[in-house]
Amino acid sequence: PPPGPSRGPDPSNPYAQNPYAQNPYARQPEYGSPYTPPPGGPYGTPPPTNGGRAPKRKAVIVGAAVAVLLAAGGGVYAAVGGDDSGKNPTASPTTTTPSHARTQDPTPEPTTGDGDNTGGRGSGESDPNDQRRVGEAKVLYQKPAPEVSKSNLEVPGFWAMKGYVVKAVENKIVAYNDEGGSKWTLSLPKAVCAAPTSTTGGKVVVAYEGHGKDACSQLALIDLNKGVKLWDRPAPESDAIGGGYTNVGMAQSGDLVGMAWFGGSAVIKVSDGKEVSPEKPSAGCSIDGYAGGKVLLRAYSCTNGTAKLQQLTPGGSIKWTYTVRKGFKVSNIFSSSPAVVALIDQDRRSGGILALSDKGRERSTLTLGKQSYQPECGTDIFGTNMGNCEGVAVSADTFYLPTEMTQDHGLGSTSEIHAFDLTTGKRKWAVKVAERLLLPLNMDGKNLIAYEKPSYTAPGRIVRIGPNGGKPKTLLRLPQATQKAERDFYSATHTYRNGNFYIATNRITGTDTTAENLLMAFGR
């Protein structure tokens, strides 16, 4: 079949090549055993990568081989490594695949007869609830992607509220009730180009296109409860070369929003949009990115090979500073509180995963061993969107991380979730499922909520896993009738809240032969 749509580079960034041109379904890196620098220098010679770029294999970091992330023309590309036997990891059957390359869905079983009008379907489309099997979740609604101004368009901005969700697409921000109807619609002058994942009291600061080509330089505070814009102002003056705002990443916590872009950064207040001025890094250092939520963290690195992670106070000053071991820097912030971060070296090799205390001291290094892990961190060429990883979850004392799909001689393809003790760094337990990718979503008290992604023949499920592991308990069994639509999301955010499960696209390709979905919602 013809190749799927590629995740193109930012046209304003001539240095970033497209790391997904060969394999548009590759995920961002997995994390294996921490890289230990050889004696005599912090970096050493990069280990073999089995020939470097491989067009048909999944982008991973394999712990056993300590595979390398290649910098291809300035763009970060995840190289693949083999396992101990020399076999290459293969793509998971649950990875999103173009519709024309898939087999037909099985004939559905008889319906329960309780179908309803879900809304959001084009004329003549059947109601998936009319094919609903006993025990399957109800499709609350299925919203098709609207026509957009260009193909392969990123559409950041999705927030789950109580009884409704909010999605941004270009210059429109729309709230959808759980019944499927529109609650409100807000129009901005131009398209939303960056947005945090967390909110403050139902309010969120988004960035939209300003003056100049691809300048993500205008900010607005949106009240997600009422659907109104509370203020609108330019981003703080850029210190980037050429004054541009490209590859913007945003993180929000309390009254603070951290912004990082290619060559610049700023912290602003949610309440009025005015800039806050935390202590600046020393000469030769620059802010890499922020992560929000309960607290705001920022990571920065320096030309001399040093790097630091800092927590900001609610007022914007520095609460604590953690110095990363020399030769490494923070690549992803999986959680801000408790702080859990991944490290890489200058050659993009994995430096392992660290947990820090609430005072900024090292709590543990996770014992990852030779296993390969695969959180879903999307495309982030310059690392400015540090807190943008799905497929991880954290409680006060435990971190949950998904493995890649592997071959199990007894079960075929399997994946697992591993639970790590944040105090000791040791693995507490593992839960395995067959023929599916198992993805942590969030915590429900002491229980973990996870998403079993659909296989080629079966739809996905939402499951609950107890604090001591054990067999997952099904909370929502998604319908067979929407299995293909569930698989067809090219890149998506997955959210479980108040018994409902939402899938929201992050990118509208505009190039597929079948209709794309913007949103799907499932409930009991």
Image (cartoon, grey):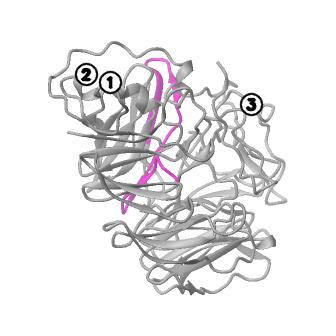
Task: Nearest to the eye among marks 2 and 3: give it.
Answer: 2
Question: Vertically, is 419 above or below 127?
Answer: below
Say whether marks 1 and 2 touch (CB < 8 Å).
yes
> Is 350 placed left or right of 118 in the picture?
right
Q: Earlier in the sequence, mark 2 or mark 3?
A: 3
Magenta-span inclusion, residue 414: yes
Residue drawn at x 62%, y 49% is: 379
Secondary structure at badge 3 equals loop
Question: Vertically, is 398 above or below 455?
Answer: below
Q: Earlier in the sequence, mark 1 or mark 3?
A: 3
User: In the figure, residue 58 lies in which quadrant?
Assistant: top right
Q: CA distance from mark 2 to mark 3?
A: 41 Å
Q: Earlier in the sequence, mark 1 or mark 2?
A: 2
Question: Vertically, is 181 above or below 337?
Answer: above
Tell me residue 491's x, y (percent). Answer: 53, 41
Residue drawn at x 54%, y 65% is: 189
Mark 2, residue position:
131
Foreground residue among 48 and 217: 217
Tell me residue 163's x, y (percent). Answer: 24, 55
Task: Nearest to the eye among marks 1 and 3: give it.
Answer: 1
Secondary structure at badge 2 equals helix
Question: Vertically, is 86 above or below 280?
Answer: above
Magenta-span inclusion, residue 418: no
> Is 412 placed left or right of 115 in the picture?
right
Foreground residue among 450 and 409: 450
Foreground residue among 99 and 313: 99
Mark 1, residue position:
481
User: In the figure, residue 8 lies in which quadrant?
Assistant: top right
What range of the chain is rendered magenta? 389-417
